[in-house]
Image (cartoon, rainbow, N blue to C red):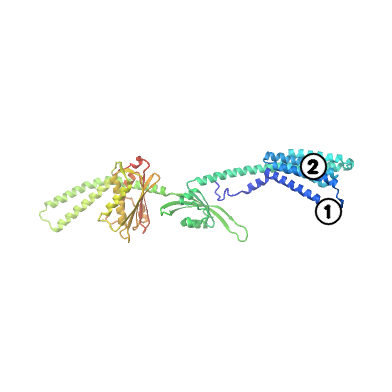
Amino acid sequence: MVLSADASRGPSSSQDVTTILSFNFIAMAIMWLRLILYVAAFFGVILIQLHQGDFLNVQIWQPFYILMIVTFAAHVGLVESARSEERMRTVLGTMFLLDGAMIPLIMWMLGSHHSLFLFLILTNCALAALSLGLPFGLKCALWSVSCLNLHLGLNSWFNPENMQASWFVDNLSVFVVTGVSGVLGDQIQFVTKDIAQKREEIEALTDINDLIVENISSGLLFVDSEFKIVRANRGAARLFGDLGLEGRALEEVFADLKQFVAIYALKAHDEPYERVELNYYNYKKEQSIFEVIISVVRQNFASGPTAKLHRQFVLLIQNVTEIKNLQFALSQKEKLAAVGQLAAGIAHEIRNPLASISGSIQLLQANLTTQTSDDTKLFKIVIKEIDRLNNLISEFLDFVRPGVRIEDPIQINDMAKEVLAMARVNTKLNQKVEQRTELRATKGLYGHYDKLKQALLNIIINAYQATGDTLRPEVFVRTYDQDDAVVLEIQDNGVGISRDNLRRVFEPFHTTKAGGTGLGLAITHKIIESHGAQIRVESEMGKGAKFIIVFNSSSREHQSRGASK
């Protein structure tokens, strides 16, 4: 695949050569050159006559004038009638034959055997063979020689005995020059056709290259040594949401990408290509992960004392956000599957001894006749901790238990309002948090209403808790339609999540809260996935977190995977 940024931009040198050597170009050049020569000859004769002054003989020159004017008019008419290549060949051949007869006629009229006229005959036959091929050139040479010999035979001063050698050389030279010109003309035509064929092949390959470059889903950017974008395909325009990338500085489009290219430029002679993943934020502040592969397309040194290395880089850019999300989801499923199997086995083994311990403690407490206040306090602590462990095991079992398929009709906007209202009246949550909403989704969903509400409430509670130390805490909930999907975003301006914790945010028992079990978001993740949806988190430390849930609403089958635990 041709990766040059200026492919098919402007006429190539081979195209110029083919145009110059084409028959139409040569034919039109010969036609107009002949007309110019006729005009020059006509005015040249007039100047000669004016210079002669009193010695002007009109009777001698009048036939010459008539012949020149008639011939000139005939040539103009022939030039104007040449509209196609086939017609042009006929017109050009007629001109050559006309000149082949006219030159000896002028010689007969002037009674001259000057070498200039022989040169004109040679030139006429050579051009005929050069432009129309060797066979026609030989025909034109035979015609011209016949007319010349007729002229010589009609002149009384022609002495065959004295001029036999000259006559033989003149005739032979006409055929030799015509033959050489014909061979050269055939070679030129062969080269012209070969160049034209190669040019068509190059243009076809260039068209295929452009078709591939413009229609691949990946973005292609061609960047020069000054880090300016010299070419961008439609894939790049879609990735950056900008149709006017060409001619702009790379730093204006993606500053991190420009820095990566600048670093690669320093070691391009050692590394044929390099790969990197970069985080890109569009004008909506939405994050995408771009995989970039860079390589050198062209590098050459300018000549002269100010020699400078000119290089061009090609950047292949792919949006791997969805792939990364799928990899993360797959990793989460593998972890959850392993934890689920472990939890199912351990939970039952722990719950039964806990029930026995709890019953024994209560019986022991009832049988003691005398109890101090410390004894009563200790009994309460033991029973409370047993209940806490039992609740934890219940959550475990709820997490690993297969869900029941339920297909409740759900309006995500109404559910979001309901969950926010529940958070607003929860006295355990920070009531200073400002709630903002932008609910524009119009498509409906199907699933387990209560379980899905539980999942959203877990995220809202986490958002509230993350804004505890924020000066002006707020939670922003947004819904909108996206193709065949419904998107729900829950964003806070809290402390954010570190990169290490972001990878483990949905893992069971992973928590950064004092006293937390680490099962809330794990259960939420399972509920969301059971509805055929995808959930991901975007966050940076100190900039809050955004939970993005994408529900597939294209079919009832996908919407109703609403199995929950």
Using residue 535 as the reference point, say whether residue 259 is left or right of it: right
The amino acid type, in three-letter code, at marker 2 is Met
Mark 2 neighbour density, 10 Å: few (under 14) some (14–19) many (20 or more): some
Residue at 85%, 47% in the rendered image: 58
Using residue 512 as the reference point, say whether residue 153 is left or right of it: right
Task: Name the one closer to the observer, 126 or 41.
Answer: 41
What is the number of the mark on residue 309? Answer: none
Where residue 222 appears, as percent x and y from the top left, is 52, 52
Query: Of helix, strand and loop, which one carries label 2?
Result: helix
Q: Are marks 2 and 1 in contact (CB under 8 Å)?
A: no
What is the number of the mark on residue 102? Answer: 2
| Residue 162 location, quadrant | top right
Label 2 and label 1: CA atoms lie apart by 26 Å
Q: Earlier in the sequence, mark 2 or mark 1?
A: 1
Using residue 133 as the reference point, say whether residue 228 is left or right of it: left
Where residue 493 appears, as percent x and y from the top left, is 34, 57
Mark 1 neighbour density, 10 Å: few (under 14) some (14–19) many (20 or more): few
Q: Mark 1 highlights which residue?
A: 51
Where residue 368 appears, as percent x and y from the top left, is 11, 53
Residue 523 makes an appearance in the image: no
Position of residue 239 relative to residue 146, above or below, is below
Residue at 41%, 49% in the rendered image: 324
Using residue 182 as the reference point, say whether residue 450 is left or right of it: left
Residue 120 makes an appearance in the image: yes
| Residue 91 location, quadrant | top right
Residue at 55%, 55% in the rendered image: 311
The amino acid type, in three-letter code, at marker 1 is His
Query: Of helix, strand and loop, which one carries label 1?
Result: helix
Where residue 522 appears, as percent x and y from the top left, is 31, 49
